[in-house]
Image: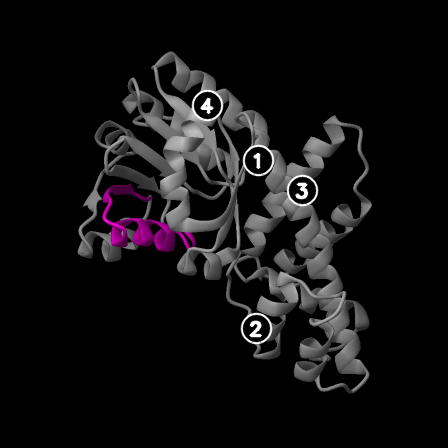
């Protein structure tokens, strides 16, 4: 494959991922609903396209990372969408966290045009996107995976082929289930430590070196201690992810009580107008249950 790459979705993570591709020498064709979010990339040499279809027509490989399943559906299947611009030997890779069944449906539509599809949701937040250290969970044929691997290596470090299209999304659901429980536990620990009068920075440093050690303690707890609730990953998007996981679990007749509880806590946060904040703001829901501000 050549070096003409499409990138659709220039949010908190997408803009950093696309920027790394430009810095690695790839020629980028970009699209985003809010054009201004592409200005930085255009200044670095990216080509602005007015529609997802135009990106698909110009690029050999196109990545998408948008917000919600409805956005994925619109970008691929809507008017002037990717499928309209797809052609033989083109590859499309959806890195949005979305419904496994939706990416499988899109793969079938692209197949009719002679194009191939991968789903490759990511984990690692804004920090991982900036540093090129994302964990990338891939659903694709082995041949498509091999063609995408050099590009994945620009964006991430832990890159795993999990199976055919849909397997990446199901792996991401498992990832989000773990994150939900961990974020809840870290939030409770911070509130407990504050109420007990501990030096929270010292507490976090100490417990992160033992069995409690995790990404959330290392990356998000320090933000809470600084009062920084801006998103590496947004509450609204996490609620979406948890909803997908619970929906898929229901189809499997599988109870996920911890995930269901954490989703309710995040819905309470959203109801307080904090849906655009980072997931670490969950600590505010735990504080609310205590009846007063502690941190």
> Is any atom of residue 155 visible in this view?
yes
Ranked by sequence position, the earlier of labels 4 and 3 is 4
Q: Are marks 4 and 3 in contact (CB under 8 Å)?
A: no
Numbered tag placed on residue 223 in the rendering = 2
The span shown in magenta is 11-32
72 left or right of 263?
Answer: left
Using the image, determine if residue 268 lies above or below residue 29. below
Ranked by sequence position, the earlier of labels 1 and 4 is 4
> Is any atom of residue 220 visible in this view?
no
Ranked by sequence position, the earlier of labels 1 and 2 is 1
- Percent from the top left, x then y, of residue 107? 46, 21
Residue 17 painted magenta = yes
45 left or right of 243?
Answer: left
**Numbered disc 3: secondary structure:** helix
Give the residue at mark 1.
Answer: 169
Q: Of 54 and 267, which appears nearest the observer?
A: 54
- Percent from the top left, x then y, of residue 236? 56, 51
Q: Are marks 1 and 2 in contact (CB under 8 Å)?
A: no
From the viewer's perspective, is the residue at label 1 or at label 4 nearer? 1
CA–CA distance between discs 3 and 1?
Answer: 9 Å
- Disc 2: CA contacts within 10 A as few (<14), some (14-19) or many (>=20): some
Numbered tag placed on residue 174 in the rendering = 3
**Numbered disc 4: secondary structure:** helix
CA–CA distance between discs 1 and 2?
Answer: 28 Å
């Amino acid at each position: 494959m050549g070096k003409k790459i499409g990138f659709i979705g220039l949010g908190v993570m997408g803009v950093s991922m696309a920027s790394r591709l430009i810095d690695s020498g790839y020629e980028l064709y970009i699209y985003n609903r809010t054009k201004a979010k592409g200005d930085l990339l255009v200044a670095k040499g990216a080509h602005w396209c007015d529609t997802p279809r135009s990106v698909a027509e110009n690029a050999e490989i196109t990545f998408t990372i948008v917000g919600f399943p409805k956005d994925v559906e619109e970008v691929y299947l809507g008017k002037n969408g990717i499928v309209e611009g797809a052609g033989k030997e083109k590859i499309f890779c959806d890195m949005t966290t979305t419904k496994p069944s939706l990416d499988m449906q899109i793969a079938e539509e692209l197949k009719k045009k002679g194009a191939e599809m991968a789903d490759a949701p990511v984990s690692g937040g804004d920090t991982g996107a900036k540093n090129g250290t994302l964990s990338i969970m891939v659903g694709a044929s082995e041949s498509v995976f091999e063609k995408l691997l050099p590009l994945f290596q620009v964006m991430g470090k832990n890159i795993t082929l999990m199976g055919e299209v849909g397997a990446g999304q199901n792996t991401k659901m498992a990832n989000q289930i773990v994150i939900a429980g961990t974020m809840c536990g870290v939030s409770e620990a911070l509130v407990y430590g504050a109420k007990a009068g501990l030096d929270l920075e010292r507490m976090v440093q100490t417990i992160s070196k033992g069995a409690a050690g995790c990404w959330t303690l290392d990356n998000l707890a320090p933000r809470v201690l600084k009062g920084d609730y801006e998103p590496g990953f947004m509450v609204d998007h996490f609620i979406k992810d948890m909803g997908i996981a619970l929906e898929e679990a229901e189809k499997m007749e599988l109870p996920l009580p911890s995930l269901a509880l954490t989703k309710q806590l995040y819905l309470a946060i959203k109801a307080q107008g904090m849906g655009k904040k980072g997931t670490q703001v969950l600590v505010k829901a735990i504080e609310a249950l205590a009846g007063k501000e502690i941190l």
